[in-house]
Image (cartoon, rainbow, N blue to C red):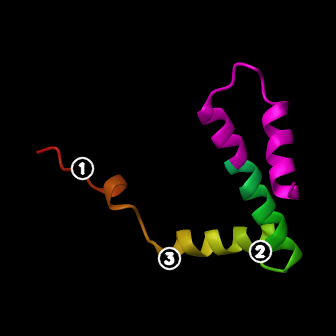
């Protein structure tokens, strides 16, 4: 049996007996996303927390004021 299949079986067996198909799908999805993220970190395809915060700050500054918060159109 493949390692992936064994891991999926272990995950399913760890879930409560009354779990739904949606619960199984969700947990498999989350497991896949975690594995993809770890692989990205291992291969250097990640961004530091500090860099993300700097990028977000620059992005927020570049978008200017939110037009909805500066005007009211309730005439």
Residue 60, by quadrant, is bottom right
Circle 3 SS class: helix
1 and 2 marks in contact (CB < 8 Å): no
Displayed quadrant of residue 9? top right
Which residue in the protein does label 1 denote?
A: 72
Say if 59 sits above or below 16 in the image. Answer: below
Residue under label 2: 47
Residue at the top extreme? 18
Measure the C-alpha gap from mark 3 to mark 2: 21 Å
36 with respect to 21 (left or right): right
Secondary structure predominantly adopted by residues drawn in magenta: helix
Tell me the residue at 87%/54% (across/down): 1
Above or below, 6 relative to 55 = above
Q: Secondary structure at mark 2?
A: loop
Q: Residue at x 83, y 70 (%)?
A: 39
Where, by quadrant of the figure, is residue 35 drawn?
bottom right
> Between residues 8 and 29, which one lies in front from this camera angle?
8
Q: CA distance from mark 1 to mark 3?
A: 23 Å
Mark 3 crowdedness (10 Å alpha carbons): few <14, some 14-19, many ≥20? few
Q: Residue at x 76, y 65 (%)?
A: 36
Label at residue 12: none
Q: Residue at x 79, y 66 (%)?
A: 49
22 over 28 or under it: above or below: above
Segment colored magenta? 1-28
Identify the residue at the far left of this view. 75
Nearest to the eye among marks 3 and 2: give it. Answer: 2
């Amino acid at each position: 049996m493949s390692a992936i299949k064994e891991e999926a079986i272990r995950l399913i067996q760890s879930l409560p007996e009354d779990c739904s198909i949606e619960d199984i799908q969700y947990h498999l999805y989350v497991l896949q996303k975690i594995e993809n993220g770890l692989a990205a970190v291992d291969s250097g395809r990640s961004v530091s927390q500090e860099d993300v915060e700097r990028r977000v700050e620059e992005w927020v500054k570049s978008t200017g004021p939110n037009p909805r918060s500066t005007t009211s159109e309730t005439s």
